[in-house]
Image: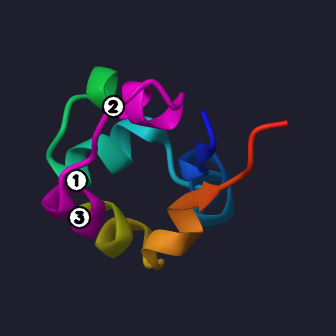
Amino acid sequence: MPIVVDIDVMLARRKMPVGVLADRVGITPANLAVLKNGRAKAVRFATLEALCEALDCQPGDLLRWEPEA
C-alpha cells in the first residue's frame, strides 16, 4: 500500500505508550493497532485530528505516500 502510517515514529519521539495515546484519542488500543500497522482502509478526520492533538504534530507527520516499487 503506498500510504505509510508513521504513528510509531511519533510515539517514539514523544516517548508515549500506545495505551496512553489510545486513551487520549478515545479509541481502543486494538483500533489504534490497526491504524499503526497500516491495515486500516480509512481514517476519520476526527480521529486524525485527535491523533495530531495528542501527539502535537501535523497530519503529514503521521501519513506519507510512497510510490509502489
Residue 59 location (% of width, % of height): 44, 71
Viewed as shown, does residue 32 lie left or right of 39? left
Residue 31 location (% of width, % of height): 28, 27
Label 2 vs 1, first from the N-terminus: 1
Q: Residue at x 43, y 78 (%)?
A: 56
- Residue 25's tag is 1
- Residue 11's tag is none
- Whole-angstrom CA distance, mark 3 to mark 1, is 5 Å
Q: Is mark 3 on a helix, strand or loop?
A: helix
Q: Is mark 2 on a helix, strand or loop?
A: loop
Q: Name the residue under label 3.
A: 50
Whether pointer 3 and pointer 1 mark residues with C-beta atoms closer than 8 Å, the reply is yes
Q: Is residue 24 above or below residue 36?
A: below
Q: Does the magenta stretch include residue 45?
A: yes
Q: Is mark 1 on a helix, strand or loop?
A: helix
User: Closest to the observer: 30 or 60?
Assistant: 60
| Extent of the magenta region | 32-49
Q: Which residue is drawn at 60% across and 33% down?
A: 1
Q: Name the residue under label 2.
A: 41
Please tell me whether mark 3 or mark 2 is closer to you in this view. Answer: 2
Viewed as shown, does residue 50 lie left or right of 19? left
Identify which amino acid the numbered label 3 is placed on: Ala
Label 3 vs 2, first from the N-terminus: 2
Viewed as shown, does residue 50 lie left or right of 11? left
Identify which amino acid the numbered label 2 is placed on: Lys
The residue positioned farthest toward the right in the image shown: 69
Q: Which residue is drawn at 57% across and 70% down?
A: 61
Q: Give the position of the C terminus as an image quadrant.
A: top right
Label 3 vs 1, first from the N-terminus: 1
Q: Is residue 20 above or below residue 24?
A: above
> Tag 3: Cα neighbours inside 10 Å, few (<14), some, or many (≥20)?
some
